[in-house]
Image (cartoon, rainbow, N blue to C red):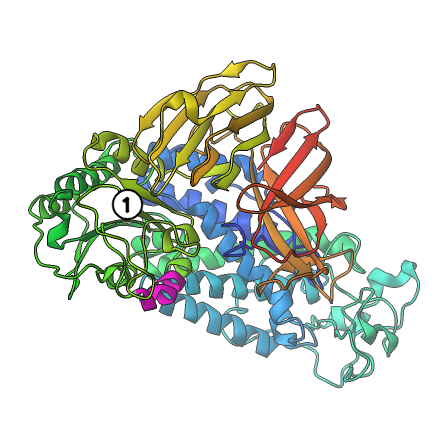
C-alpha cells in the first residue's frame, strides 16, 4: 500500500514520500498516505482513550469521527489542549512520529518482501506477519520501559502491511467496503486465486485499465493481488496474473501485460478506487488500536500512547566534599520536584528516581510515584567519605537510566570529575535510546571548595569543557553552580528546561557574536538563554544587545540571573528580522527559543530531517536516513514539515551551520509538496552541523526554525 516515508530524527546531527503502496506522505495532512492514515487513527483512538479513561467531554468530534481526517493539525492541537487541561503529561507527538516512522520504513527495509506488502498473492504470509508483529506489540508492552519503543515499532510495521492489503489486493474491486476481519489472525479464510489461476487480462490502453481483472475472478469473489518486481532477473510472475503496476514494475512486461491493479494514489492504475481503499484501511487501523486497548487495558495502552510515560531523575554526588553545597543542591532538587506537583505543571512524571553516587559506590536507587516521599528522602540526605577526587558519576546515572521511563529528564549534581568515564559511551547510548536529556550542575573549581580539575586520563571533566560531554550530546546542558548565590535562579533554569521548545538560534563558542534571526507573527514569547559552565557572567547590560525589526534597541526582561547563566524573556516580540550581538569573549552558549506552551494551538512548529531516496518509488520519493551520513554524500535531501503556517510558502532555504553559528552551506528548496513539506538538496560537510530552515511566505513574513 502506501509505501510511506515519515519524519525521522537523526540523533547527533540536530541535537518521505511515494512508494509501491499507499503513498508514504510527509505528514498527516496528506490524508490518504500511510502517514496520514496512521496519524488519523492514532488521534481518533487517543480522543476515545481520554474520554474513557479521564472523562474528557471536549473531544467527541474527534473520537466519533468517521471517514478520512481533513485537518490533523486542528485535531492534534485540540487533544494537546485537553491533556494540559486534564494535567496529563503527553508525548503524543513523539508517539505519532515513532509509529508512523516505523510504518513507512517498511518501504525501505522490506521493499523486496511480498509478505510485507501483500504482493504476489502472499495472503497467508502477509497475515502471519501481521499476527506475529501484533503479538510482539503485546509482549513488549509487558516488558521494561524501553520496550514501549519496540511495541510502537512493531505496531507501525504491522499497520503498513495491513494498510497495503487494501491498496494491493482486489478487496475493493470485489465490492467489499469494510475491513477484512481475518487479516490479523495469521490465516485467511477468504477464497483466493490459486497459483495456476489467471486473474488479469492484457491491457495496455487506459480505457481498459480499471477493468483488467478477469470477470470470473470478480464473479467468484476470488482474492488476488498484483505481482511486483523492479529487477528483470528473478521476475517470475505466473502467466495470466495481475501486476502491481507503476513505472518501475517490470512484471507488467509479462502476461498479463500492461496496467496493474494497485490503488496507491488517485493516479495509480486503479486510482478511482484509491479513496475507498484508504477509508477501509483507516477503519482497519482504528480497529487494531481498539483491539490492543481492549487486550492490554487502560494503563498499558495509555503508556503506548505516551501518557505519563516519563521519569524525573535526580542524581547527586554524596561524597564529603559536597558538604558546602549540599544545602543548595537539596533546595534545587526539591524545587524541581515541587514544580512537577503544581496544578498547571506541563511536565508530570510517571515516577521519580533518586540515584546517589560517590566513590567507591553508588546507589541504592529510590523509585517512587510519591513526590513527597522523594522530597523527604532528599531532605534527609547526608554526605560523607570520598578520599580521592573522581567519583563514580556514570554508574549513578546508568543505574537510573536502566529503570527510568522514555523521554525522561535527568538532573545531576557533582563537584568532581568522573572516575568511570569509560562508561560514557554506554550511558550516552542508553540516554539516546530513551530520548532522555541530561542536565549537569557542576560546582566549578572557581570556588575554593570545588574540586580541582583533573586531566582526562585521571577522570573525565564534567564541567562542560569536553566537546562530547553527556549533557550536550543528549540535548541538555552543563551549568556551573555557585552555592553563594540564591538557589531560586538556578531552580528557574532547571524548570525552564522541563518545557518543550522550538529553537530559532543556537551558538556555542567564545568569540564575539553578531547574528540575525527571524521572528514570525505566531510567536508570542521569545526566550534567550545565556549559559556558561565555568565563566562568571558579568552585568546584564554588557551581556547581550538586541535590535528589533524597527531598529530599536530592546532590553529583554531578565527572569533569572545566576553566576553561570542569564535567562531572558521578551513578550509579544515584533515580527521581522532581529539582530543579536555580544562583544564579550568567553566560553558560553546562546540559545533563542520559543516555548511550545505559550500559544500551542497557533505556534508554528517545524521538523527538519535528513532523508534518502526510495528506489522502488516514483515522483522523487525519499525516506528516513537509517545510518549516519558520510562526508560529501550528495544523494540525500533535507525535508522540513511545518504546522500552523500563516500563509502559503513562496520560497525556502536551509542553512547548515556549525556550533559557533557560522554558515557552512545554503540550499534552496527544490520542491514544495501540496501539503507544505519542503525538500532541499544537500551535501554533507566534514564537520558537525545544525540545520536552520528559513521559509518566506507569500504574505512576506519569514519563519525560522
- The percent coordinates of residue 342 (x first, y second) are 24, 33
Q: Which residue is mark 1?
A: 441
One can see residue 59 in this view: no
Q: Is residue 438 above or below residue 212?
A: above
Q: Front-most of 237 and 229?
A: 229
The quadrant holding residue 387 is bottom left
Pointer 1: residues within 10 angstroms few (<14), some, or many (20+)?
Answer: many
Q: Front-most of 171 and 71?
A: 71
Residue 441 is covered by the magenta coloring: no
- The magenta stretch spans which residues? 421-430
Q: Secondary structure at mark 1?
A: strand
- The percent coordinates of residue 125 (x first, y second) are 58, 78
- The percent coordinates of residue 74 (x first, y second) are 54, 34
Is 145 left, or right, of 702 in this rendering?
A: left
Q: Main secondary structure of the magenta part?
A: helix
Residue 428 is covered by the magenta coloring: yes
- The percent coordinates of residue 543 (x first, y second) are 43, 27
Q: Is residue 93 above or below residue 592?
A: below
Amino acid at each position: 500500500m502506501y509505501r510511506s516515508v515519515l519524519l525521522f530524527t537523526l540523533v547527533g546531527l540536530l541535537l518521505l514520500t511515494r512508494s509501491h503502496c499507499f503513498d508514504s506522505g510527509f505528514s498527516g495532512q496528506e490524508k490518504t498516505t500511510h502517514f496520514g492514515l496512521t496519524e488519523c487513527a492514532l488521534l481518533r483512538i487517543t480522543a476515545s482513550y481520554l474520554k474513557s479513561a479521564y472523562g474528557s467531554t471536549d473531544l467527541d468530534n474527534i473520537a466519533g469521527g468517521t471517514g478520512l481526517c481533513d485537518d490533523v493539525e486542528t485535531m492534534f492541537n485540540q487533544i494537546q489542549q485537553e491533556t494540559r487541561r486534564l494535567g496529563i503529561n503527553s508525548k503524543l507527538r513523539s508517539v505519532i512520529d515513532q509509529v508512523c516512522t516505523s510504518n513507512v520504513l517498511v518501504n525501505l527495509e522490506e521493499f523486496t518482501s511480498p509478505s510485507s506488502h501483500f504482493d504476489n498473492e502472499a495472503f497467508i504470509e502477509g497475515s502471519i506477519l501481521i499476527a506475529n508483529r501484533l503479538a510482539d506489540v503485546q509482549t513488549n508492552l509487558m516488558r521494561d520501559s524501553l520496550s514501549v519503543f519496540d511495541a510502537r515499532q512493531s505496531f507501525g510495521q504491522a499497520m503498513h502491511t495491513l494498510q497495503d492489503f487494501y491498496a494491493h489486493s482486489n478487496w475493493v474491486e470485489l465490492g467489499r467496503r469494510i475491513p477484512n476481519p481475518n487479516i490479523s489472525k495469521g490465516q485467511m479464510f477468504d477464497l483466493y486465486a490459486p497459483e495456476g489461476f489467471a486473474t488479469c487480462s492484457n491491457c495496455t490502453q487506459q480505457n481498459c485499465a480499471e477493468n483488467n481483472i478477469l470477470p470470473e475472478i470478480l464473479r467468484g469473489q476470488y482474492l488476488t493481488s498484483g505481482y511486483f518486481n523492479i529487477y528483470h532477473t528473478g521476475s517470475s510472475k505466473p502467466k495470466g496474473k495481475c501486476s502491481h503496476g507503476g513505472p518501475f514494475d517490470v512484471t507488467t512486461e509479462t502476461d498479463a501485460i500492461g496496467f496493474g491493479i494497485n490503488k496507491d494514489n488517485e493516479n495509480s492504475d486503479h486510482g478511482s478506487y484509491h479513496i475507498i481503499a484508504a477509508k477501509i484501511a483507516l477503519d482497519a487501523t482504528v480497529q487494531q488500536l481498539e483491539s490492543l486497548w481492549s487486550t492490554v487495558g487502560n494503563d498499558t495502552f495509555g503508556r503506548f500512547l505516551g501518557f505519563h510515560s516519563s521519569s524525573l531523575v535526580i542524581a547527586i554526588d554524596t561524597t564529603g566534599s559536597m558538604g558546602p553545597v549540599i544545602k543548595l543542591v537539596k533546595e534545587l532538587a526539591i524545587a524541581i520536584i515541587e514544580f512537577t506537583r503544581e496544578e498547571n505543571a506541563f511536565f508530570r512524571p510517571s515516577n521519580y528516581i533518586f540515584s546517589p553516587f560517590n566513590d567507591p559506590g553508588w546507589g541504592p536507587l529510590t523509585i517512587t510515584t510519591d513526590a513527597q516521599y522523594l522530597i523527604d528522602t532528599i531532605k534527609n540526605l547526608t554526605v560523607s567519605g570520598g578520599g580521592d577526587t573522581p567519583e563514580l558519576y556514570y554508574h549513578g546515572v546508568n543505574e537510573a537510566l536502566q529503570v527510568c521511563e522514555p523521554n525522561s529528564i535527568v538532573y545531576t549534581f557533582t563537584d568532581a570529575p568522573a572516575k568511570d568515564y569509560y562508561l560514557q559511551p554506554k550511558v550516552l547510548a542508553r540516554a539516546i535510546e530513551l530520548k532522555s536529556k541530561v542536565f549537569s550542575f557542576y560546582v566549578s573549581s572557581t570556588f575554593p571548595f570545588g574540586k580541582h580539575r583533573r586531566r582526562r586520563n585521571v577522570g573525565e571533566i564534567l564541567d562542560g569543557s569536553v566537546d562530547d560531554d553527556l549533557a550536550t550530546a543528549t540535548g541538555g546542558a552543563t551549568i556551573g553552580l555557585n552555592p553563594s548565590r540564591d538557589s531560586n535562579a538556578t531552580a528557574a533554569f532547571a524548570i525552564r528546561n522541563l518545557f518543550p521548545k522550538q529553537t530559532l538560534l543556537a551558538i556555542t563558542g567564545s568569540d564575539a557574536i553578531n547574528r540575525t534571526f527571524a521572528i514570525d507573527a505566531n510567536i508570542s514569547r521569545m526566550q534567550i538563554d545565556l549559559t556558561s559552565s565555568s565563566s562568571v557572567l558579568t552585568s546584564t547590560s554588557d551581556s547581550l544587545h538586541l535590535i528589533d525589526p524597527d531598529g530599536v534597541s530592546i532590553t529583554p526582561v531578565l527572569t533569572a540571573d545566576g553566576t553561570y547563566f542569564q535567562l531572558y524573556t521578551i513578550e509579544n516580540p515584533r515580527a521581522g528580522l532581529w539582530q543579536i550581538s555580544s562583544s564579550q569573549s568567553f566560553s558560553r552558549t546562546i540559545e533563542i527559543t520559543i516555548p511550545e506552551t505559550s500559544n500551542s494551538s497557533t505556534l508554528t512548529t517545524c521538523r527538519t530531517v535528513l532523508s534518502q531516496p526510495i528506489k522502488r518509488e516514483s515522483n522523487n520519493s525519499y525516506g528516513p536516513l537509517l545510518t549516519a551520513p558520510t562526508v560529501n554524500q550528495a544523494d540525500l535531501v533535507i525535508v522540513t514539515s511545518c504546522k500552523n503556517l500563516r500563509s502559503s510558502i513562496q520560497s525556502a532555504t536551509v542553512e547548515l551551520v556549525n556550533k559557533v553559528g557560522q554558515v557552512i552551506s545554503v540550499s534552496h528548496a527544490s520542491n514544495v509538496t501540496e501539503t507544505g513539506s519542503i525538500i532541499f538538496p544537500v551535501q554533507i560537510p566534514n564537520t558537525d552541523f545544525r540545520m536552520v530552515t528559513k521559509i518566506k511566505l507569500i504574505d512576506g513574513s519569514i519563519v525560522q526554525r
